[in-house]
Amino acid sequence: MCYTIEALREIVVLLNFYSLCRIVVSCGGRITKDMFDEKLKEIKEKQAEVQIKSESYDKADEKFYITANTVLSLAKRAYKIFLSSEIAEKRQLLQFLLQNPMLDGRNLVYKLKAPFDTVLEANQSSVRQGYQDSNLG
């Protein structure tokens, strides 16, 4: 199952309430102020941990989208960048993109490095999907 951060926070609140109810029931309905305060302290600590994790996930999400946007922008401009580059820069770009490039006669045989292989695969599948869709009508 996949939950949103908000749903996970609500689950934590409900579980905390459930925990408090179990303590009250296990004590025969009689709970001391010290017992309640101790459990409340534990709950607050757990909530703080969840908040910290939630914030780190939010930051990771933001970094992912920034990185993905940068990769896609580079991929869109790669050909122009390559053509306008010096030989040494072209070599660096090819080393950045290609995994184990080899010559087979006059043909370059290569495999793209991640994440460029995934971008190419996604692009090719969307092109095929668009082609198929246009023929359905």
Image (spheres, rainbow, N blue to C red):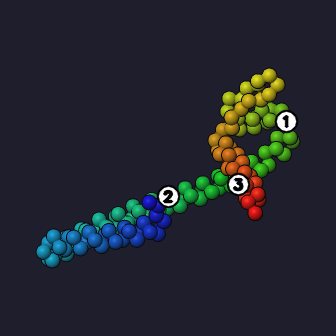
Is mark 3 in CB contact (under 8 Å) with mark 2?
Answer: no
**Residue type at numbered disc 3:** Gln
**Residue type at numbered disc 1:** Glu
Local SS, label 3: helix
Real-space Cα distance between discs 2 and 1?
41 Å
Badge 3 or badge 2: first in the primary sequence: 2
Q: Look at 23% across and 73% down and name the residue there.
A: 21
Q: Which residue is mark 3?
A: 129
Outermost residue toward the right in this view: 84
Q: Which residue is mark 2?
A: 56
Badge 2 or badge 1: first in the primary sequence: 2
Q: Which residue is mark 1?
A: 86
Q: Quadrant of residue 95?
A: top right
Outermost residue toward the top in this view: 105
Task: Answer yes or no: is residue 37 visible.
Answer: no
Q: Please, is residue 123 above or below residue 86 in the view?
A: below
Q: Please, is residue 20 above or below residue 120 in the view?
A: below
Q: Nearer the viewer, mark 1 or mark 3?
A: 3
